[in-house]
Amino acid sequence: MTALLVNFLQLLAFFLWIMLITRVVLSWTNPMGGGALRAFVFQMTEPILAPVRRLLPPSMGMDWSPLIVMLLLGVVMRVIVRI
């Protein structure tokens, strides 16, 4: 049972990592565009990024919340592997 839970959490963290990278790339390549993929990615990542964004002070137009969340996901993935 523990191995199944660890594998699920690792898969979930990896999926979130990919969604965050996709969101960052989409914001660079098509910042004003729309589409189904963009809407899906933004809906998946916004509940995770919004609380972090509220905690961080604004810094010259840069959104550091994806980086912070990715670092936290990396820590969580390393802790899960040690279990």
Image: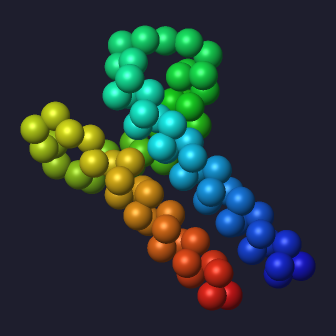
Quadrant holding the N terminus:
bottom right
**Viewer-proximal residue among 16 and 43:** 16
In the rendered picture of this protein, how many numbered marks are placed on residues?
0
Whether residue 83 is visible: yes
Q: Position of residue 43 (x, y in %)?
A: 56, 31
Q: Is residue 20 above or below residue 40?
A: below
| Residue 2 placement: quadrant | bottom right
Q: Is residue 64 left or right of residue 3?
A: left
Residue at 57%, 47% in the rendered image: 18
Residue at 15%, 42% in the rendered image: 58
Q: Is residue 1 left or right of residue 47?
A: right
Whether residue 54 is visible: no
Q: Position of residue 31 (x, y in %)?
A: 35, 19
The residue furthest bottom is 82
Question: What color scheme is it?
Answer: rainbow
| Residue 77 placement: quadrant | bottom right
| Residue 44 placement: quadrant | top right
Residue at 10%, 38% in the rendered image: 60
Q: Position of residue 26 (x, y in %)?
A: 44, 27
Q: Position of residue 67 (x, y in %)?
A: 35, 53
Residue at 39%, 42% in the rendered image: 50
Quadrant holding the C terminus:
bottom right
Q: Is residue 52 above or below residue 34?
A: below
The residue furthest left is 60
